[in-house]
Structure formats: structure tokens, C-alpha cells
Amino acid sequence: MKTAYILAGLIAGGFLLGYATAIFWAPTYFPNLFKAAAQPSNIREYTIFIEPAQIQIAPGVVWNAWTYNGTVPGPTIHVKVGDIIRIRAVNKLNLTHSLHPHLPYYDLKHDGSQVNIITGVGKGSMIPPGGEWVYEWPASKPGIWYYHCHSADGGLRIVDHMLMGLYGAIIVDEIDEPPSRNFVVFMAETPAVRGAIVGTGQRPFYIMNGMGVPGGEPELEKVYAGKSTIFPQLKGLEGVAQLFNNSMPVFKAKLGERLRFHIINIGDLYHSFHAHVGDHRSQYVLGGRSWPAQIVPLVPGAADTVILVYNRPGVYLFHCHVVSHADAGMIGLIIIEE
């Protein structure tokens, strides 16, 4: 099964207490789903390098990001209930970093947070520069989960470490999960960290980035992402000066195909998710029922999986339904083909 991988973007910039407005962005295509090393059991082994990367988010605009394996978001881990996720993490940055999972029922020594330093249990899971740690997390419950850095080293906040690029998705399927086309969408804002943005005024930005991930083993297939053309505007959140381009993420699927949108609000602000027209059900939070008005509310840190099925071909919108965020760029397309 071929599946598309995409990060597609609409740039916005400005200054408001260290934050700006909403974007999609499209630096490149890359195979962002992790393929586990072969194991005879239910152990799924991965290696993650915590490393810097320069990511071009538009012509002349480069983001000096902190990354897991050179991408933002980091690799998507896709497993089944009963699997064991084992990650060898190597810190190639000059601050302490970690991988903290939003998963239930794992050993405290693999928490990757300040509690490991306070208690001394698993202290090495807060990985110093040049260090490494092997995390082990059981995939005990189905759902959309995620991992992120929980460090506050360097005089920064935890959210600064996260929004510099250190986050990624974990999808845990039921053993008998029906075939689906899977997409991951992160919603976030990026803080004004000195030197993070190079070019175009070094403006911070919000992001809503998405990628497709397969229901089975991945085979890369490219999908369309528009080219970036930046022009200035004065509109949006509390009068913030913004920059826009004309690209947006475009996800393609077949008529009647079961689509799963895994939505994660990784940032510090409220967002929501709304897809037009299709049958629209919350897989995990509401147990198969629809959200009222087909709008998924996402407080900071919240996540849900939305199952969408379209019964006619066409081009359909999805967007953040904080409408000022949609105005500022949190919007994309779903193309349903026969």
C-alpha cells in the first residue's frame, strides 16, 4: 500500500508576546513513518537522534530547528496493542533533552522528565549532550499518543524545547483495526527563540503541519504541495503583522476509503479541527460518536482520532475552527477521487 507523506505550509509572522499566527508549511517530502528493526517478538526497536536541522519553510526563510531524526514533526511510531516500543535516543545537541511519552502504564525510569532527576530513578532518561538512553514503553491501549522533549535546560521552558521541533506521534492500533488511510496533523505555535528563524525579519510563527502515514508498512508516494510565495498582510490574531504564502496541505484518498485523521495540539493555545461534509466520527474520545457540529475541540496537549468517510468525489476543506486561525492559514484540502 502506498501512502503519501507531506508537510505543507502557509507562513505567518509577527510579534505578540513571543508568538505569531497560524501556518502550514512545506519544506520537503520525506518518509516520516518509522519502520521498526526486525525482531522475532513484539518488541519494536527504533533509533532516534536528537539533532539540529535547518529546515527551509519558504524561499529565503530557514528554521534552525531541534529535531528527532532531522524532521519536524519527528518520526511517527505506528504499532499495535501489545507491542513494546524500544527507542535508543542519542543526544547530538548541546543541551539536555529527552523523549517523554503520552502513553499509559510504563516504568517511571523511562519517563524522560524532571521527576527522573528529582528521584534519581532513570536519571539518564534526561539525556545530557553526547549521551544516550534506551526508552521502553508498552503499547497497552489503542489511541493517538505522542512523545516530546520534557527538558527545560538552557534557561528555556519545556514548551520552548517542544516547539523548537521536538515532538512526534505514536499511533497504537487495535489488533483488528480495519484498513485505513492515516494522516497525522499537529497544531502548534513556535516561540520567538533567538536565532530560530533566519530571513524575513526572523519572525516566529504558528504551525499546523500534517503528514500521511500508512495502515501497514510504508511505501513512499508523493502528493501535491503548493509552492510558497510570501506577501505581507495586517490581519489576524490581535492585529499581529503576518506573512502568508499560497500553499496548503492537500491529502488525496479514494471514494469510500476509511480515513483516520490523528489530530494533536502540541502547542500552548486552544485549537480545533473541522472537516467539511464527510461522515465524521471520534474514534477514541467519544467512542465512535460524532463531535457536536463536527468540530473537535483541542485544548493544549489534547489529541483525538477522527474517522472520515466520503460518499461522493470532490474537494473538501479541513481547518482549525478558531476562525481567526483559519484566516491566518490553518486550512487544508481533502481530495476524494473515484
Image: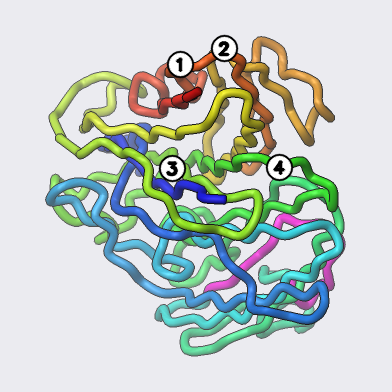
In this orientation, which residue lies closer to the viewer: 234 or 263? 263
Mark 3 residue element: strand
Q: Residue at x 39, y 46 (%)?
A: 7
Segment colored magenta: 97-110
Tell me if residue 236 is in the magenta stretch. no
Query: Which residue position is annotated with label 1?
Result: 314
Query: Which residue position is annotated with label 4?
Result: 179
- Mark yes or no: residue 122 visible: yes
| Local crowd size for mark 4, using a 10 Å CA cut-off: few (<14), some (14–19), many (≥20) | few
Name the amino acid type tagged 1: Gly
Q: Spatial distance from mark 2 to mark 1, Cα to Cα? A: 10 Å
| Local crowd size for mark 1, using a 10 Å CA cut-off: few (<14), some (14–19), many (≥20) | few
Name the amino acid type tagged 2: Val
Question: Is 243 located above or below residue 54 in the figure?
Answer: above
Circle nearer the N terminus (3, 2):
3
Q: Nearer the viewer, mark 3 or mark 2?
A: 2
